[in-house]
Amino acid sequence: MKESEKPSEDLGVEGMLGDLRKQIAECLPEIESLEKKEIAFKLLIYEAVFATNFVPWMTNTWVRCQSDKAREVCVDNLLCEIKEDHPAMLRNFVSVAEQHAGDVKIEEVTESIRRIISRLTDLSRSPDAMNGLLIMAALENTSLEFIPWMEKAAMKLGATDLEYTKKHGMADIEHANEFVVAVKSEAEHLGVLSDQLTQSNSLKLVSDLLQEIFSAK
Ligand SMILES: [Fe+2]
C-alpha cells in the first residue's frame, strides 16, 4: 500500500486545512467591487511576500525533515520552484499592477505583514520540520482558493502573462495533496499526535498573512 493510500486514522490534518481553506475563500473580496488600484496593491503585496520568502521557508523546512516522504515532497516542490524560476514568473505576472498602483508605497502598510513573515520564518526554523510542513500544507491548500482569485483580479487590470496562475492553484492540486501526506508522514515518524499538531501556530499565521494581503480593508 502506498503511503498516500493508508487509511487515515487521521491526525485531523485534512479537517484543519479544510477549515483554513474555507476561511480564506470567505475573506477574498468581490473583484467587481474593488478598484483597480486596490487590486494592484494586493497583487504587489503578495509578490513582495512570496517572491522572497517562499523558497527560504521551504528550504528551512526541507533540511529539517526526517521522514523520507516529507523530504521528497519538499525537494520536488523546491526543484520545481527553482528550475522554473517561480519568483520571476510571479514578478512577470504582477508587473501589470505597477501602472495601477499610483503613488502608494507598499513599505508603509506592511508593518503587520512583516511581523507575520518574521514569525513564519522563525516557525520554519523550528527544531523539527512539523511547523514548516504545516505552513507549506496551508499555503498549497489555500492557494486552490486565492490563485484563481488572483488570476481574475489580474485580468481586470489587463494582465496577459498568466503563467504563474496557470502553474499554481487548482493546477497544482497534487502539491497540495502531497503536503498533507508529508505532514502525516513526518508526524508519524516523530510520534507527534493530532492534538500537538493543532497547537502549532502555523495555520493561524498563514491565515493572518493571507487575510492581511487579500481582505477588503
Ligand atoms: Fe511556485
Image: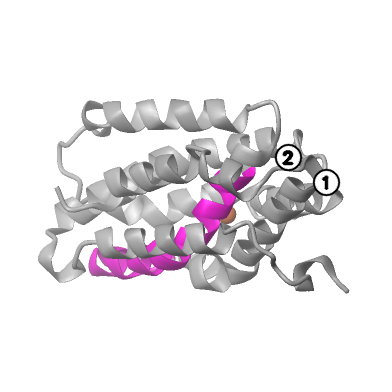
At x 36%, y 42%, the residue is 209
Which region is colored magenta? 133-161
Instruction: Quadrant for residue 36, please give it.
Output: bottom left
- Image: 36 above or below 203: below
Q: Quadrant of ligand 1?
A: bottom right
Magenta span: predominant SS is helix
The quarter of the picture where the N terminus appears is bottom right
Q: Is residue 120 magenta?
A: no
- Front-most of 16 and 177? 16
Instruction: Quadrant for residue 161, please give it.
Output: bottom left
Mark 1, secondary structure of its residue: loop
Side (left or right) of 209 relative to 35 = right
Q: Which residue is mark 1?
A: 67
Identify which amino acid the numbered label 1 is placed on: Ser
Mark 2, secondary structure of its residue: helix
Q: Which residue is mark 2?
A: 62
Residue 164 in sight in this render: no
- Image: 189 above or below 112: below
Q: Is residue 137 magenta?
A: yes
At x 65%, y 40%, the residue is 130
Closer to the eye: label 2 or 1: 1
